Image: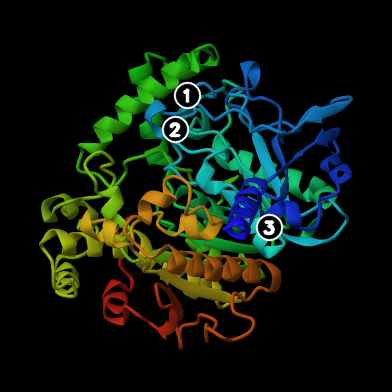
Amino acid sequence: MKGFTSRFFFLILVSCIGVSAFASPIDTTTLLVTTHQGTLRGIIQDSICAWKGIPYAQPPVGELRFRAPQPPLSWTGVRDASHTGFVAPQFRRATNESNKRNEDCLTVNVWSPAADGHKRPVMVWIHGGGFLVGSNSAEMYNGAGLARNEDVVVVNMNYRLGALGFLYFNDIKGKQTGFDDNLGIRDQVAALQWVHDNIAAFGGDPDAVTIFGESAGAISVVTLMSMPAAHGLFHRAIVESASPEALLRPEVGTALTQRYLKMLHVSPDNLQQLKSISPDTFVAVMARLVDELMHEPTTVKLFSPVIDGTFIPENPITAISEGKAAGIDLMMGTNKDEATLLALKRVGLTPRTADELQPYLANIEPEHRKILVTKYRHYPHKKGVMEMTTDGVFAMPSIRVTELQSKFATSYMYRFDWSSWGMNLVGLRACHGAELPFVFGTLDKKPGKYFAILSNMKRNWRLSKLVQQSWANFARYGNPDPSGQQAWGKYDAAQRSTMIFNKKSKSTSDPKSEQRIAWTGQSIFK
């Protein structure tokens, strides 16, 4: 009994200290890193080195509001980098960090095994949230697990959101100056420039940068692939659940901006008023406009980047088809049931009924529409509507982009099918965002632990390991399956190899061929 008691208390002691106490210690001198702007002091967190709240541009406040990001200012002494920076102004219900919203939000967080001069692959995360919400401090995007498990450097960024990031002034400002467009995307380019200039000091390789993002972040990745301003700042791209056709035409961006200004009681002839309005007012008015758009029969529900002809010269899909992203290896995929989360009443971004789906099908010729709906045996019931919306908004455009890019660079396709019994019970299944806790290894944090309710956690962690290895292998080698164990081949128009991530993952060929053929040449965004 005495021996058992001793062993029992020893186990308690080990669990309190943590496994990291028995691992190789991290040299704390590597927590001091010198960037082009000055010296930072990081922290050791989750057995990994982290530097947080690092400015990659000047605060976009005062006269810099609505201006392209300006290079960050230098500092003297040692800057504390132990805490995340401010969250971009956004709806309060979107985040628990209610006391941390501020326009001074243009920061990055960095996780690295060590700032030791090694040249590790760099993975730069762009968060989603409909270009309205989200931040690099969300616990689900904590890069510690991915960096530690796969020996990579993980960076995630904030960028301006909502009205402060995506109003379109080009066609309404006349001779007024001091107002730039596509600011959120310009912020992303500035963050990538900071990574290029500084990441070697954190143990990363500036010549091996992979950008990855989900939802609006994935749209951003596709957009960046096509843009001259981002050329050379990254080398590979992972696109998770993009709606790549969702960029706005200039006339749509102009109309939305004019409508927003009218609600804000600001005349297009006096845009200077926008420099003094409080961020909370911008957010409140945007909430009203989004609520109106949700109840209107239109496919445009949110502000998005605008194809302005200069900074974003053309439709990204057109640019990719013309080889403008040649040489950028691509891994792209969607989740099996993207629409179920977005169609929830409190979200309202996608249709819930066959009647609500009609505006999305309005750009398709009636005869072809009849053929299309026959490919969904559950239509016009809810499940069929969810399947059609998932394919029309996410899956088929993503397949098209991957097919186009495969002509100019190595490309891979995946689909994430995993869902828990709890998610099935509430009708979400493999919904939008379900892969994120597996990518970052945050199944034990919100909302990952909610996704995993009533599921086998041992099996979940095993799937997370496979997903992380695939993402990191792609960043390191340009191949998510270099060993060939998963038989995950390159994607092209002939083979259409697609990795299905599930409780038992496997590679297959053209998993939705019948629907893909029916959607060929059809788009809901015209």
Q: Nearer the observer, disc 2 or disc 3?
A: 3
Q: Nearer the observer, disc 1 or disc 3?
A: 3
In front here: 525 or 503? 503
- Residue occupying the point 46% across, 16% down: 269
**Three-letter amino acid code of the residue under disc 2:** Thr
- Cα–Cα span, label 1 and label 2: 7 Å
Position above or below: 306 against 81: below
Label of residue 148 in the image:
3
Q: Residues within 10 Å of mark 2 (few under 14, many from 20)?
A: some
Of the numbered discs 1 and 3, the one sitting upstream in the chain is 1
Q: Are marks 1 and 2 in contact (CB under 8 Å)?
A: yes
**Three-letter amino acid code of the residue under disc 3:** Arg
Q: Position of residue 79 (x, y in %)?
A: 80, 28
- Residue at the spot of label 2: 95
- Residue occupying the point 74% across, 51% down: 21
Q: Quadrant of residue 498?
A: bottom left
In front here: 509 or 299? 509
Determine the secondary structure under disc 2. loop
Q: Quadrant of residue 81?
A: top right
- Residue occupying the point 46% across, 88% down: 494
Determine the secondary structure under disc 3. helix
